[in-house]
Image (tube, helix red, strand yellow):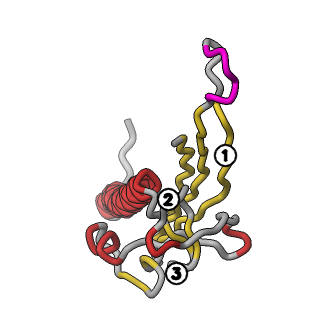
Amino acid sequence: MKRLKNEEGVALITVLLFSMVAFGVVTGAYYMVTSHSKLSGMSKRYISEIEVARGVASYVIGELKNGTLQCNNGNTCCSTPPCTGGLTGTPATCQSGKTIDIHGAICAALGKTASSNGCNNVTACMMSRTDYTEIDPARAAPNDGVKVSVYSINVKSNKPSGETADIDVVVRL
């Protein structure tokens, strides 16, 4: 084998190549750790918003069962009567500005700040209400049916950073 006469730069080039490879590995590891931390934080915030939306949905269902659900800053009864304060009315869709009132104590319990008509960054909307009479086919008299109401509710919870939870609930009472 023939040896080169001038080998002074070979060690330097070898060290530089190994340094570049090591730098690439360290940079890749750093990127993976930081991107994983960001995704983990986004996931945690999203799960938090899902829990807030589920909590509001549970509150709305409870108010429907009690017959005390109100909309539009207490101006409209969204439940089947009775409703507190003797209010009556037919719920309208959110597109026409009818939103479900969320009590300030519920906002605080869910970690949200209260606003004049509910929680900041949380909305609950009565999408529809359908009333009908269920008739038991085993009964002889068709007028002995049971009155039933079916409600469609939409709950949205979001953070200013962009995570949003959107839950649709259908309740039969």
On the image, the x and y values in percent for residue 172 come to 54, 41
Query: Quick one: quadrant of the N terminus?
Result: top left
Q: Mark 1 or mark 2, which is nearer the start of the sequence?
A: 1
Q: Residue furthest top?
A: 138
Residue highlighted by disc 2: 165
**Nearest to the observer: residue 160 or residue 74:** 74
Residue most toward the bottom? 116
> Which residue position is annotated with label 3?
73
Q: Residue at x 56, y 79 (%)?
A: 75
Give coordinates of residue 10: x percent, y percent.
Answer: 35, 58
| Gap in angstroms between the C-alphas marked 2 and 1 | 29 Å
What residue range appears in magenta? 139-144
Q: For this view, does 140 lie left or right of residue 154?
A: right
| Rendered residue at 65%/64% (across/down) | 91
Return the mark for residue 148.
none
Mark sitting earlier along the chain (2/3): 3
Q: Amino acid at mark 1?
A: Asp
Q: Which residue is mark 1?
A: 131
**What amino acid type is highlighted by mark number 2?**
Ala
Q: Which mark lies nearer to you, 2 or 1?
A: 1
Look at label 3 and name its amino acid.
Answer: Asn
